[in-house]
Amino acid sequence: MRYRGGVGQWSWMFHRLTGVGVLIFLCLHIIDTFLIVLGPEHYNTVIGWYRYPLFRISEVGLFACVLYHALNGLRIILFEAWTSLVRWHRQMFYVQMALFAALMLPVTYLMLRPVFSR
Amino acid sequence: MAAPPALSSAYGRPKPIGGMDLWSWYFMRVSGLALLLLALGHLVIMHLINSVDVIDYDFVARRYVGWFWRGYDLLLLVLAMIHGLNGMRVIVDDYLHQPAQRRVAAWLLHGLGTILIVLGVVAVVTFRPPVTPVGVGQ
């Protein structure tokens, strides 16, 4: 599609990838939540799967996808509101990624702590 | 096809001139801002304040005693699904060019979307825990 290289292309591609990833999880999450209507046995069995280490790591990935998509979307809205900011689009992307990393570090620690402390 | 503005790769989709595309463009931005709070809030509540270790049937039963969290979850469910499916539609339109292919894709997205939104709404609205638990948790 609009492959022009550089930061713009990567941020745009990751916006799509994270969006599709979150949508796929959301569809599965609606189905697992629906089991609550069928009773505790079904719901607790399936929700229990989320406690396996592989799932916990995936949940960190999900958090990262939502956070990236949110920050990148916010940057897009800022550009559209103040078009002159586009001059600094590269710098703004680096600030966005620094913020993303700064938030993901404690999030990853808090979410994975139970895996290593047992 | 007209060339997109030179800066389009640095930021969002060019603003459409009118019609449904313009409504879709506005919806993505307004719902996106709402979802920024709703979806990140949901993740913080479920994975940082609580965790998958404490989430089970009883947890949901305590959380769904009142209507606040049901309302929160309904809003999150509907906005996220429409935002996500509309995003998929934009992606599909970029890669599928034959009208027949687009029709099939639109059918799939609408069908799957409708079924899942209905399932989600039914779960949030009709869930009745057998015994009302004591205390209201997050």
Image (cartoon, helix red, strand yellow):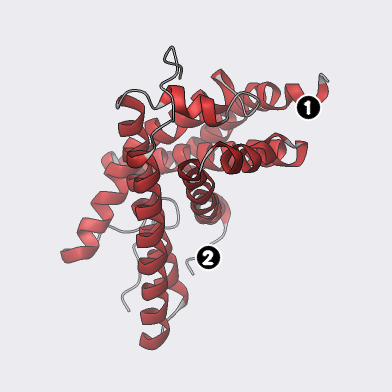
- The answer for which chain carries disc 2 is A
Mark whose residue sits in front, 2 or 1? 1
Closer to the N terminus: mark 2 or mark 1? 2
Which chain's residue wears label 1?
A: A
Residue A31 at x, y percent in the picture: 51, 51
Q: Secondary structure at mark 2?
A: loop
Where in the figure is residue A106, as x and y percent of width and height? 64, 21
Report the residue that reaches farthest toward the left.
Answer: B19
Q: Is residue B19 visible?
A: yes
Residue at screen point 65% across, 36% down: A60
Q: Amino acid at mark 1?
A: Val
Q: Percent from the top left, x then y, of residue B28?
A: 31, 50
Q: Secondary structure at mark 1?
A: helix
- What residue lies at 74% left-to-right and 22% top-to-bottom? A113
**In the image, what residue occupies the spot 27% across and 42% down?**
B30
Circle 2 residue: A3
Residue B16: x %, y % from top left: 24, 62
Judge by depth and name the residue closer to the eye, A74 or A60. Answer: A60
Distance from Cα at disc 2 to Cα at disc 1: 40 Å
Left or right of residue A85: residue A91: right
Q: Which mark is residue A115?
A: 1
Name the residue type under label 2: Tyr
Quarter where residue B57 is shown: top right
Q: Which mark is residue A95?
A: none
